[in-house]
Amino acid sequence: MVPKIFWLRCETKKLERRSALTPSTAGQLIKDGFTVFVERDQQRIFDDEEFERVGCSLVDNNTWPSASLDIPIIGLKELATSDEPLPHTHIYFGHCYKGQAGWSSVLSRFKRGGGTLYDLESFTDATGRRVAAFGFHAGFAGAAVGALALASQREGRRLANLEPYASEVAMVANVRAAFGGSGKGAKALVIGALGRCGCGAVDFLRKIGLDEGDILKWDVGETVKGGPFEELLHVDIFINCISLSSAIPPFLTRDQLEAAGAHRRLSVVVDVSCDATNPFNPLPIYDVITTFPEPTVPVDLPQGPPLSVVSIDHLPSLLPREASEQFSSDLLLTLKEFPRRDTARVWTDAKKMFDDKMAEAAAELAGRWYGASKSRMTV
Ligand SMILES: NC(=O)c1ccc[n+]([C@@H]2O[C@H](COP(=O)([O-])OP(=O)(O)OC[C@H]3O[C@@H](n4cnc5c(N)ncnc54)[C@H](O)[C@@H]3O)[C@@H](O)[C@H]2O)c1
């Protein structure tokens, strides 16, 4: 009999306050017969006592490496970088299945430890749609940061130091205030507007007062003609929310921006998709992931207004409580199936994805080793 247990680990990424389990979902798991261990964590948006009150067993911060190997470890974001083998079953967003920087090294830790990764990104329903995702709040918060960056630029300042908001309402009020009451008059274009992030971005832009006609909503129908797209130069904010699955022509290029010279309205690019390290990156105008302390990176251009890029890869952390509640409740049914993971489709698909990626990683690492040893022989 597979034990009904989860261990909620702390997040080690700075300023990440979200949580894969909330007191509400942990409580529902416990009612369903699960034991839930929760690492004490000052950074998490939920107090330790909230978990204690619903019957979780509190354990010390970052002690999951010493947990019994039959306890699955659940978290959200990447584990701290290390070469340590990983012998446990882990459930989190590994960000190592799409050729991201360092992907094969992460998977080699599982290979050496004998552990398994059930990547939250590979949990999909029968139609292929993600079971649980933070998309809506990512787009919502991304649009908020983009709007704040635009408001700051208009005042001749660079946006600095974002702090998580207590609620969506507080976020909208803060951004409206930065525009002197309303964002009306600003113009934005969202690509991927029919998806989760895109819907969140559009919802936010409406809430701060942009006219409907000033929110251009593009999806695959509009980009099928192939970029780069002239239209992007004529809005204040461009928000990229696509889910990238294969090589596509770039949406925006540095040559295009330079050629536009002073005839450019575009002032802020928000890359919610954050594919800067993806080999198919459609926005080859920047190459760093930005952060809450430094939310924007400038694109150095000889002419025209300043152009800032926002490429924060944990945008929903700006709304940690609401984003966690939504994500965790969407995940709950799947988590309850964990004891049947060898037959439940969501889990078997996620395991197959892991096995396939492990094989790719082994081939990649073998090739790298072979290449290195060959070059050692020729020098
Ligand atoms: N930065 C962050 O904090 C953060 C958080 C969550 C998700 N994300 C990322 O945001 C991206 C979108 O996530 P989602 O949940 O909204 O996905 P989704 O599948 O719900 O939506 C993606 C949308 O993009 C559209 N699309 C795909 N390719 C396109 C193209 N070439 N041109 C135009 N439209 C295209 C799809 O039709 C779809 O409507 C993903 O890459 C995800 O990893 C980022």
Image (cartoon, rainbow, N blue to C red):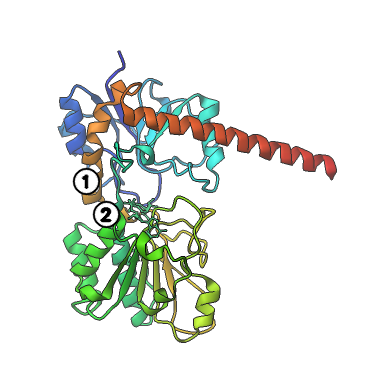
Residue at horizontal 37%, vertical 41%?
121
Q: Is residue 304 above or below residue 99?
A: below
**Quadrant of the rendering where the N terminus is positioned:** top left
User: Ligand 1: does it lie within 8 Å of the C-beta at label 1?
Assistant: no
Amino acid carrying mark 1 in the image: Gln
* Rendered location of residue 205, percent (x, y): 24, 68
Q: Which residue is mark 2?
A: 136
Among all residues in the image, which is located at the extreme top? 1
Residue at horizontal 73%, vertical 41%?
372
* Rendered location of residue 227, percent (x, y): 47, 67
**Label 1 environment density (alpha carbons within 10 Å; few <14, some 14–19, many ≥20):** some
Q: Quadrant of residue 89?
A: top left
Amino acid carrying mark 2 in the image: Phe
User: Ligand 1: does it lie within 8 Å of the C-beta at label 2?
Assistant: yes
**Quadrant of the rendering where the C terminus is positioned:** top right
Task: Assign ligand 1 to one image quadrant.
Answer: bottom left
Residue at horizontal 26%, vertical 54%?
136
Q: CA distance from mark 1 to mark 2?
A: 10 Å
Q: Which residue is mark 1?
A: 326
Q: Quadrant of residue 118?
A: top left
